[in-house]
Image (cartoon, rainbow, N blue to C red):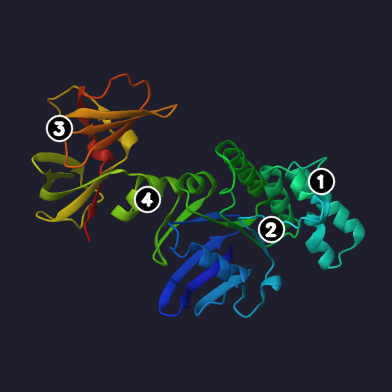
Amino acid sequence: MAILQLDNLTKRFGNFTAVEHVSLTVADGEMVALLGESGCGKTTTLRMIAGFSEADEGVITIDGKVMNSIPAYKRNVGIFFQNYALFPHLTAYDNIAFGLKVQKRDRHEIREKVGKIIHMVKLDGLEKRYPRELSGGQQQRVALARALVMEPSVMLLDEPLSNLDAKLRIEMQEEIKRIQRVLGITTIIVTHDQEEAISLAHRVVVMDKGKIVQVGPPEEVFENPCNAFIADFMGFVNIFEGTVESVADGVMCIRCMDKLIEAEAASCDEIVVGEAVKLAIRPEKLQLSDNKNSHNVFTGTIESTTYKGNITRVEISGIITEPLFAHKSDFYQKPGDTIGVYLPPDKIRVFKTK
């Protein structure tokens, strides 16, 4: 069952189109991430859903009811702001209870609902503290509880983890995922962080220049981007250009400078011989190999290594015009060493240049 429906949503600011003909259906209990660079239109889309910004074209439907003319406070939408927006003069309890009190709910009902949500977000014992007496993570839980206690049809999260340090960000990812799963609440999360999107969402919606450019499960968007822009955004740091020399028996041969690289042709049906293409491969998919007799094995020189804890980032030159980057664990070679690099054909993604 669809809880949220966007049909041809468009928003303009003067001559600039921030969101252009965005259509999306979000199912009951689904968490969807709007992912993209700053200025891609994701936050503007969220603001239109919330009712803070009016759509120039298109229709927003929540629970089967058209929302376009409904003011924000009547849309039954919970909103989690990037800066938490807590009332500094109110305790954690009163911040959470604020919306219920505005609605003049029964005192016993308020106590019961707030108590349950405080326990759910693990704020027991902190009810009487003011925001200044809480850590960043605790403030975030208060803001989340304040939105959830209203039992909204749709929960909107705007860059919810951007103000947290790395350790706390990971912890809160798990908390948000747990709470969303327990409550089964339909959720839209806006983020520019690829890892955050694929960790939290059931589906990822990638936006660019106000348009949706790819929608799919996290693993699909992560492993099989539909164009070079998305590949770059999703961490395919090895992207280089070539020309198709042949396509036969499910294998595409591509000339890159003086190298001939083989890639699986299954996902490249529209690409023909002679066409200029871009190749992309994730750094963790590169294999370091000395088997010089295999296809797609080339010799290069280690330019630099960067230790990153669980992996080492290796920069290799002398294979393609641009350096190749590999991510490897237990790597002990040093800059200046010669190394063999294998590009698995099934891990290479090929895109049209236009």
Tell me, yes or no, whether the two marked residues, 2 and 4, touch with CB atoms within 8 Å. no
Crowd band around label 1 with a 10 angstrom C-alpha radius: few (<14), some (14–19), many (20+): some
Instruction: Tell me, yes or no, if residue 227 can be seen here.
Output: no
Quadrant assignment for the N terminus: bottom right
Instruction: Give the Cα distance between marks 1 and 4.
Output: 41 Å
Name the mark on residue 233.
4
Residue type highlighted by circle 2: Ala
Give me the residue at 34% from left, 34% from top: 284
Quadrant assignment for the C terminus: bottom left
- Mark 2 or 4: in front is 2
Residue type highlighted by circle 4: Phe
Which comes sooner in the sequence, label 2 or label 4?
Answer: 2
- Mark 3 or 2: in front is 2
Which comes sooner in the sequence, label 3 or label 4?
Answer: 4
Report which residue position mark 1 lands on: 129
Instruction: Give the Cα distance between marks 3 and 2.
Output: 57 Å
Tell me, yes or no, whether the two marked residues, 2 and 1, touch with CB atoms within 8 Å. no
Which comes sooner in the sequence, label 2 or label 1?
Answer: 2
Instruction: Tell me, yes or no, if residue 299 can be seen here.
Output: yes
Instruction: Give the Cα distance between marks 2 and 1.
Output: 16 Å
Give me the residue at 54% from left, 68% from top: 5
Q: Secondary structure at mark 1?
A: loop
Report which residue position mark 3 lands on: 295
Give me the residue at 42% from left, 45% from top: 219
Residue 120 appears at what percent x and percent y? 74, 44
Residue 242 appears at what percent x and percent y? 15, 49
Q: Secondary structure at mark 2?
A: loop
